[in-house]
Amino acid sequence: MNSIYIIDFCILAAAIYLLVVGIGMKKSGKIHKSVMGEELIKNCVDEKAFIDAIYPWMIVFSIASLIAGIAGFLLDYFKVISWANYPTLGLFLIVFFLFIFQYRRALKKYFKDM
């Protein structure tokens, strides 16, 4: 088995996990401890507002990660020219940086001492 498949699988697994955690946070109204440590969660001024701020970005990022993982696996499996993966990776990176930007902005807004 080619080791690149392991990376594609890890991306897919992380995307599914992030999707499940995001949906779980939205339903419960509580920040999941895998999103941040329990000590930091205690500093949250408004958990629901924080979740509302990052939830759409978590979903978009997890979908972009799913696309990147599936595309990477298919391109590796069928041995398609490697440049065909660049648009998918570009989308993944753009969404990743947007997610991080929005996450940090929500941290500053809804947490004390951030």
Image (tube, helix red, strand yellow):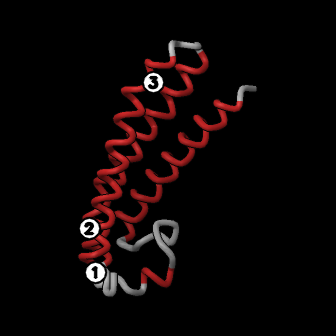
Is 69 above or below relative to 84? below
Q: How many marks?
A: 3
First reached walking from the N terminus: tag 2 or tag 3: 3
Tell me the residue at 24%/76% (across/down). 109
- Residue 68 quadrant: top left
Q: How far apart, in angstroms, are the residues tagged by discs 1 and 3?
A: 40 Å
Q: Are there few (<14), some (14-19), or many (20+) residues within 10 Å of tag 2?
A: some
Q: How far apart, in angstroms, are the residues tagged by discs 2 and 3?
A: 30 Å
- Amino acid carrying mark 1 in the image: Asp
Tell me the residue at 39%/29% (across/down). 88
- Where does the image place residue 40, in percent across and percent down from the top left? 44, 81
First reached walking from the N terminus: tag 1 or tag 2: 1
- Where does the image place residue 67, in percent across and percent down from the top left? 43, 33
Is 60 above or below relative to 74? below
Where does label 2 land, which residue?
Answer: 105
Q: How far apart, in angstroms, are the residues tagged by discs 1 and 2?
A: 14 Å
In the rendered image, which quarter contains the C terminus? bottom left
- Amino acid carrying mark 3 in the image: Asn
Q: Which mark is residue 46?
A: 1
- Amino acid carrying mark 2 in the image: Arg
- Residue 45 quadrant: bottom left
In the rendered image, which quarter contains the N terminus? top right
Tell me the residue at 26%/65% (across/down). 52
Describe residue 97's horizontal placement relative to residue 1 as left or right: left
Q: Are there few (<14), some (14-19), or many (20+) residues within 10 Å of tag 3?
A: some
Q: Which mark is residue 24?
A: none
User: Residues at badges 1 and 3 in contact (C-beta under 8 Å)?
Assistant: no
Where does label 3 land, which residue?
Answer: 85
